[in-house]
Amino acid sequence: MDRPNVCRSLDLGSGIGSVGLYLLGLVGREDMELVGLEAQEVSHKLAVRTVARNGLAHRVTMLHGDLRDPDAIPNHEKFELITGSPPYMPIGKGVMSPHPQRAHCRMELRGSIFDYSEAARRWAAPGARFVFVMSARDDRTEQGPAAAGWTVLERMDVVFREGETPMIAVLTCALNEDGPHPPRREEQLTIRMKTGRMSPEYRALRQQFGFYVDE
Ligand SMILES: C[S@@+](CC[C@H](N)C(=O)[O-])C[C@H]1O[C@@H](n2cnc3c(N)ncnc32)[C@H](O)[C@@H]1O
């Protein structure tokens, strides 16, 4: 995956802010602005505190709201990059954690990838990219963005241990109307080899993104 170079980014279901804030550091542009939108008050408050403690309030806004609400973003702003890691388990299909933050991360208590894809489309600037992570085994991972008018440009399936089937997938989408788009790219990333060691490609990716490699 290429390193993004964006000015305005929106993180949907931003939780405690880790994905959005990591992206801000990765892009490394001093003029980059980030908006996070999170429905759970407890997570939202933690994100606000993190932003303040890191002196980022001049370019990071953490909003408390529901991404299904078209008025959740003031002034109907548009963004070049929209990210999200939606809950992936329909209500009634899995065991609900008694811990609310965990339950809201996993169970589709406030919508699914269909709602995320629609929200991403609503707040997308022309030429925008929508990047999300979802279950690799769920047909809705492709159906959600397609239903909202997104074309998948890249899909990376992630295998946690060599030889197993992929568990999660990272998809990069562009707006249909911004086409014609290049042929879709597909790749697979293995995290650990059968021995338990990190795979060479995962080590390289961690190093590229500035993460510690401990082996
Ligand atoms: C898998 S977690 C993502 C956590 C986040 N990336 C972080 O760094 O903390 C999904 C998050 O989306 C939030 N969420 C789910 N549906 C939402 C909705 N309709 N509007 C706003 N946030 C939502 C959940 O509350 C949860 O915090």
Image (cartoon, rainbow, N blue to C red):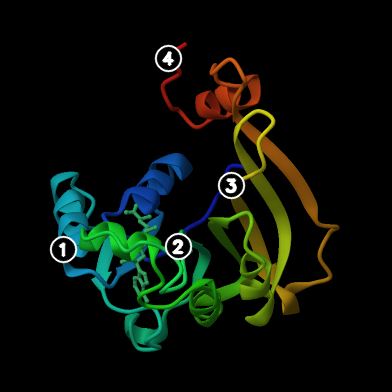
Badge 4: how crowded within 10 Å, few (<14), some, or many (20+)?
Answer: few
Q: Secondary structure at mark 4?
A: loop
Q: CA distance from mark 1 to mark 3?
A: 28 Å
Q: CA distance from mark 4 to mark 2?
A: 33 Å
Q: Is residue 80 left or right of residue 38?
A: right
Residue lying at 46% horizontally and 72% vertically, measured from the top left: 90
* Quarter assignment of residue 1: top right
Front disc: 1 or 3: 3
Circle 3 sits on which residue? 167
| Sequence-first disc among 1 and 4 | 1
Between 157 and 19, the residue placed more toward the observer is 157
Circle 2 sits on which residue? 8
Q: Secondary structure at mark 1?
A: helix
Front disc: 4 or 2: 4
Which numbered dot is residue 42? Answer: 1
Circle 4 sits on which residue? 214
Q: Secondary structure at mark 2?
A: strand
Q: Is residue 4 left or right of residue 46?
A: right
Front disc: 3 or 4: 3
**Amino acid, disc 1:** Val
List x then y, in percent, for residue 33: 37, 59
**Amino acid, disc 3:** Met
Badge 1: how crowded within 10 Å, few (<14), some, or many (20+)?
Answer: some
**Amino acid, disc 2:** Arg
List x then y, in percent, for residue 188: 71, 40
| Sequence-first disc among 3 and 4 | 3
